[in-house]
Image (cartoon, rainbow, N blue to C red):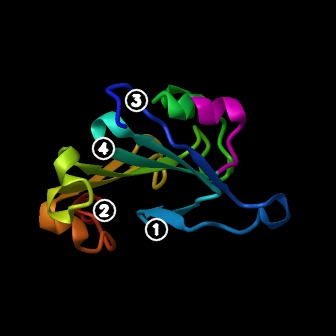
Amino acid sequence: MRSAAWFFATFLLAIPASAKAQSMGTLTENGVSMDVKAAVVVYNEAEYKLTFYLLPFLPSAEEISALQHDDKSWLSQKPSPDPKKWNERCPHGRFRLQWLGGQALGNPKESQVWLYACGIGKAGSNINLNKSGKDSMRPCSGQSRQDRRSR
C-alpha cells in the first residue's frame, strides 16, 4: 500500500574497491568530464519521483542517509576528489524521473526527466536539462543550449 509519507527505496550502486579506477559513466560539461564512481538511488513514493544522485566518490553511510532525506547541502562542502580538475568543491549530478500522478505511473507521456550537473565544467556552474511528456522519451545527449552559449 502507498502512504502519504515519504517512502525510500535506496540502493548504493558502487564500484568494488578492486576496480576504483573504472567509472559507471561520465557527466560532461564544456569538455570537462566527471567519472561517476557511485550512484545513490532514492524513490519518493509520495511524489512519484525516482532520483539518481551521481557522485565522483564512494559515499559514506552518513552521506547516503543525508541524500535519502533530501539533504544535499553537504555536497557543496565536500572536498574535491581531484583538486587539479576542480579546486573549489566536489562536482556532482542528479538524474530524476517523475510522473505527474499515481495514475500516470509508468506512462512516458505523463513523465518528466530532469538532469542536473553542478560544478563540472567550471566552478559554480549549474546545468539543468528538462524534458516532459513525449519529449522525455527522446535522447538527452549532445550539447545543451547553455553549452553552446558559453563557447
Instruction: Say which amino acid is labelled 3.
Output: Trp
Vertical order, 68 against 57 (above or below): above
Residue picked out by circle 3: 6
Q: Residue at x 65, y 57 (%)?
A: 37
In primary-sequence order, the first of circles 1 and 2 is 1
Vertical order, 122 against 69 (above or below): below
Give residue 31's mark. Answer: 1
In primary-sequence order, the first of circles 3 and 2 is 3
Dots 3, 2 in contact, CB < 8 A: no
For disc 2, the neighbor class at 10 Å (few under 14, some 14 to 19, many from 20) is some
Q: Residue at x 60, y 30 (%)?
A: 65
Q: Is residue 101 part of the magenta span, yes or no? A: no
Q: Is residue 40 left or right of residue 99?
A: right
Give residue 49's mark. Answer: none
Q: Is residue 58 part of the magenta span, yes or no? A: yes
Question: For this rendering, which residue is in front, 13 or 90?
Answer: 13
For disc 4, the neighbor class at 10 Å (few under 14, some 14 to 19, many from 20) is some
Residue picked out by circle 2: 147
Dots 1, 2 in contact, CB < 8 A: no
Q: Secondary structure at mark 1?
A: loop
Q: Residue at x 32, y 74 (%)?
A: 142
Q: CA distance from mark 1 to mark 4?
A: 33 Å
For disc 1, the neighbor class at 10 Å (few under 14, some 14 to 19, many from 20) is few
Residue picked out by circle 4: 48
Q: Which image quadrant is residue 140 in? A: bottom left
> Start and end of the magenta stretch?
57-65
In primary-sequence order, the first of circles 2 and 4 is 4
Where, quadrant-wise, is the N terminus in this rendering? Answer: top left
Q: CA distance from mark 3 to mark 1?
A: 37 Å
